[in-house]
C-alpha cells in the first residue's frame, strides 16, 4: 500500500467544499473510498469544529 494525498470536492448550493487528507491505498479508487470513509468518521466523532484557514479575494 502507498500513502496517497486525496482531495475530495463537493459542489454545494452556495459554494464548494474540499476535504484533503492522506490515506493508505493500492489504487486511486481505494484512496477515494478511504478518504470518503475517513471524512464520514470524522464528522460522526466531532461535536464542534471551525475553519482554521482561509483565503479571501475580491472579484
Image (cartoon, helix red, strand yellow):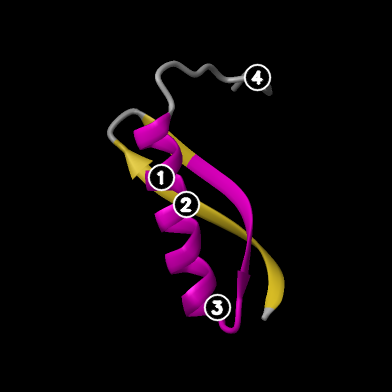
Identify the residue position indicated by label 3 in the image.
28
Give the alpha-carbon distance from disc 1 to disc 2, as whole Å: 5 Å
Q: Circle 3 sits in a helix, a strand or a loop, which is it?
A: helix
Where in the figure is residue 15, as x and y percent of width and height? 40, 32
Residue in front for this viewpoint, 52 or 3 = 3
Identify the residue position indicated by label 4 in the image.
52
Q: Residue at x 40, y 19 (%)?
A: 47
Residue 55 vertical position relative to residue 8 in the rendered view, above or below: above
The magenta region covers: 18-45
Q: Residue at x 53, y 16 (%)?
A: 50
Q: Residue at x 40, y 32 (%)?
A: 45
Residue 48 vertical position relative to residue 27 in the rendered view, above or below: above
Give the alpha-carbon distance from disc 1 to disc 4, as whole Å: 20 Å
Q: Badge 3: how crowded within 10 Å, few (<14), some, or many (20+)?
A: few
Residue in front for this viewpoint, 56 or 29 = 29
Give the alpha-carbon distance from disc 2 to disc 3, as whole Å: 15 Å
Q: Badge 1: how crowded within 10 Å, few (<14), some, or many (20+)?
A: few
Of tags 1 and 4, the one toward the viewer is 1
The quadrant where residue 57 appears: top right
Of tags 2 and 3, the one toward the viewer is 2
The quadrant where residue 43 appears: top left
The quadrant where residue 26 appears: bottom right
Q: Circle 4 sits in a helix, a strand or a loop, which is it?
A: loop
Give the alpha-carbon distance from disc 4 to disc 3, as whole Å: 28 Å
Answer left or right for 38 relative to 1. left
Q: Are marks 1 and 2 in contact (CB under 8 Å)?
A: yes
**Residue 59 lies within the magenta run:** no
Q: Residue at x 59, y 22 (%)?
A: 59
Identify the residue position indicated by label 1 in the image.
41
Residue in front for this viewpoint, 22 or 12 = 22
Amino acid at each position: 500500500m502507498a500513502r496517497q494525498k486525496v482531495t475530495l470536492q463537493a459542489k454545494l448550493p452556495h459554494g464548494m467544499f474540499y476535504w484533503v487528507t492522506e490515506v493508505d491505498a493500492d489504487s486511486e479508487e481505494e484512496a477515494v473510498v478511504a478518504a470518503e470513509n475517513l471524512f464520514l468518521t470524522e464528522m460522526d466523532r466531532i461535536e464542534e469544529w471551525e475553519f482554521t484557514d482561509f483565503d479571501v479575494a475580491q472579484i
